Amino acid sequence: MSVKYVPVQWNSNKWKYDAALIGAVAAYVLIYIRLGTPAADLARPLDYAILRMRAFGTGAFWMLTVILCIGPLARLDKRFLPILYNRRHFGVLTTAVAFTHAMFVLGWYFSFTPQSQLQALLTSNLSFSQVLGFPIEILGLAALLILAILAATSHDFWLSFLSAPVWKSLHLLIYPAYILVVAHVALGYLQIAKDPTFAILFTGAALVVAGLHLAAWNKERRVDASSTLWVKACRPEDIENKRAAIVPLSKEERVAIFRSGNSFSAVSNACAHQGGPLGEGKILYGCVTCPWHGFSYRARNGRSPAPFTEMIPTYNMKLEDGMLFIDRQANQPGTDVEPIIHEVADNG
């Protein structure tokens, strides 16, 4: 329970999550090649090789698109939170798929070059001054390098070693990586493709990512713009017993309202250990328990049970017209707050 690095243990949910991801990737590649085979002249190996490259290349693009949709979706609808929790596994697998695409490209186009394959890739096209024919290989390589850095630092050890703010800032590089991937695909595949289907899907995917982030930003902007001291949260019956509702107070600050039977308490959503999302956890043995490493806190005062000393901020609440409201001003970590008591028909 002390504030130090503690590894996250694997559980059945993680295994199921990863199995579903790997199965989806395998199915996508097989279906892509299967559907593309009739259009290819299999008498020429070139067609199959390119088909295989594109299967993994487009697969990495779709996976990266989904990853960037998970965050805003979780802010808009808490039902997406379980997907968000294991998103780092998704990112590591995306890097592996993108790396496979790069290896197929190097193996096909640069196998017989007198230079090293990487050197040949970097020097084969230097037409940086033109749009048509722009060296898209550089864009793809830069995106792959960023993804590799994010995958290598995705483990909780790096979250603890770098600190949560630094780690989060580093992983915001996912956005430049996506821009590079979009440019890589747009300047490459879309210039030579005759079928507009992928162009339509590609454009739609980029717009969905932008639209979801805009919607999430607008939702949080409305919260930031409010000048009232009390923030409307939710109805008590909307919170599942032993679980929490996560309420944004600002772009950076979120509160978790936990329900234990007919008792409701509000604490900071950030665990004191590594900033884990407490609102995604549940109440175990009478304590709010972080889903990342199991750190526990009393809901009414934000204090870890003895002999541990970690503390998190608490928040005052009130109940008006069947709706819970949260005071914007956080209490000092460890401040005792009398819970809101409200009779709920189903205590779970």
Image (cartoon, rainbow, N blue to C red):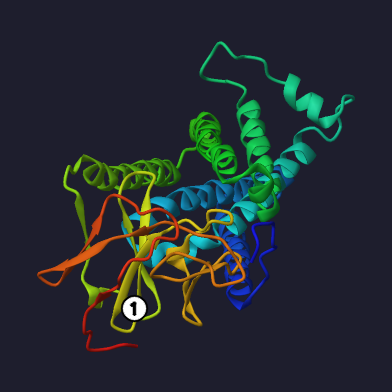
Residue 269 figure quarter:
bottom left
- Residue in front for this viewpoint, 153 or 145: 153
Q: In the visual, does 77 lie left or right of 88?
A: left
Q: Residue furthest right?
A: 114
Where is mark 1, residue-wise?
A: 240
- Residue in front for this viewpoint, 163 or 104: 163
Does 213 appear above or below 308? Answer: above
Q: Position of residue 134 (x, y in %)?
A: 58, 20
Q: In the visual, does 51 lie left or right of 248?
A: right
Question: What type is the residue that disc 1 sits on?
Answer: Glu
Residue 222 figure quarter:
top left
Q: Position of residue 169 (x, y in %)?
A: 54, 38
Quarter holding the C terminus is: bottom left
**Res. 41 visible in picture:** no
Q: In the visual, does 80 lie left or right of 118?
A: left
Q: Position of residue 276 (x, y in %)?
A: 53, 58
Does 329 appear above or below 133? Answer: below
The residue at the point 64 percent across, 75 percent down is 11
- Residue in front for this viewpoint, 142 or 28: 142
